Image (tube, helix red, strand yellow):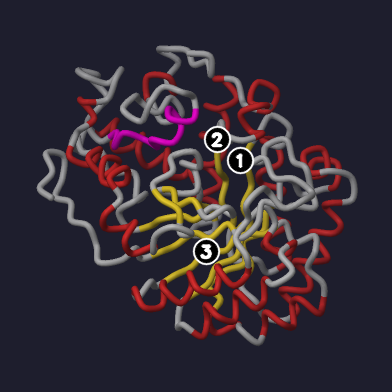
Amino acid sequence: MKAKGRDFKVLSAPLEVFLSITNRCNLGCGHCSVSSSPSPGPGELTTKKWLDLVGEMEDMKVFTVRISGGEPFCHPDLFTILERIIRGSMRVSINTNATLIGREEARALKGMAPWIDDVMVSLDGSTPQVHDRLRGEGSFERAMRGMEALLSEGLPVSLYTTVVRYNWRDLEGIILLARKMGISGVKFNELIPMGRGLDHYRELSLDPEERRTVLSIVKDLKEDYDGFVAGTYVDLLEIMASVEASDGDLSLNTCSAGTTEIAVRPDGWVVPCDRLYGYRVGNVREKGLGEIWHHSDRLNRFRERFQLTVDDLSGCMGCRYRHGCGGGCPAVPYNLGRGMMSRDPLSCYRILKGEEGFSIDG
């Protein structure tokens, strides 16, 4: 496929597949992107179907599998699924809140350690007072015990922090805690308006001045703790630097959904990435993942986005900042009901500079 914005060719298989193996979670966080619940969601795939899917992924030569949920440690057959992935010579990353991980679980993971690239733990504060406000009483101490169990077995652990109104002043505290524990790095990510995160967006999101302050803080932290800080806030700083230098082009180049990665929901629906949770392109109950990857009409329509440029996005044509912008994340406008061919307001440089306002209502 020859793209106006950039050359684009469908790979023989995704490099990474994101498997949300259950919608069940033991926590009820207000910023949850998938609206998880204490019980399994409707129509969740059986363990056998997950194992069959992993077998197909092995045949497709998928490189990496990212396991998530809900909370993956709520799935009774998590380790059976992990063992099958590893037997298929695929690398594994796990997203978890760590509150259900004890010595037994950590030891079981240690046996798989050569294949595990990362156990990424969601931690939203360096103290119980901050973290528990978002994730529930006692969740900080349970997460700490889980991380300590993982680290004691020599497993690679990183942190994922969703930056919201209640924790943005604690970012360096999170870094200092992580470094003291021997954790490999921290991602500082924006709150994405989807799932319960959309329901609670007005309560949790930063106002424009706070957001600009956080960008300045993250910039300083990245310089002070070189190589330790990553995440969407760092990505945004890089985009801003490119825009300010006017050294970019007009390509929509900040998204790997449907190009190098794909995601499978607990109910078997395939989506371009885990953020585009409602953009269903096929179900593995009905068709193989390979068939969906290559022949889904809806996925191929999504890929047509990469034939376009930033100038083709609603609200972006002629913008003096569009060079180097990259177009942002299509999931944000899509989840706000504005379609994927609208600008991403969380990446818009005009909004970042305060030249325009932003509301989830339009």
Residue 147 x %, y %: 75, 66
Query: What residue type is disc 3 on?
Result: Arg
Q: Residue at x 66, y 35 (%)?
A: 168
Magenta segment boundaries in residue numbering: 325-335
Q: Which residue is mark 2?
A: 192
Q: CA distance from mark 2 to mark 1?
A: 7 Å
Circle 3: is it few (<14), some (14-19), or many (20+) Cα within 10 Å?
Answer: some
Name which residue lies at 39% across and 73% down: 63
* Residue 280 appears in view: yes
Three-letter amino acid code of the residue under disc 2 = Ile
Residue 246 among those drawn in magenta: no
Which amino acid type is shown beneath numbered disc 1? Answer: Ser
Residues marked 2 and 1 touching at CB (< 8 Å): yes
Name the residue that disc number 3 marks. Answer: 66
Q: Residues within 10 Å of mark 2 (few under 14, many from 20)?
A: many
**Residue closest to the eye, 69 or 5:** 69
User: Quick one: 22 or 168, which is closer to the camera?
Assistant: 22
Callout 1: helix, strand or loop?
loop
Specify whether residue 175 is in view.
Answer: no
Would you identify the image quadrant in which residue 197 lies? top right
Mark 3 vs mark 2: give the one in front.
Answer: 3
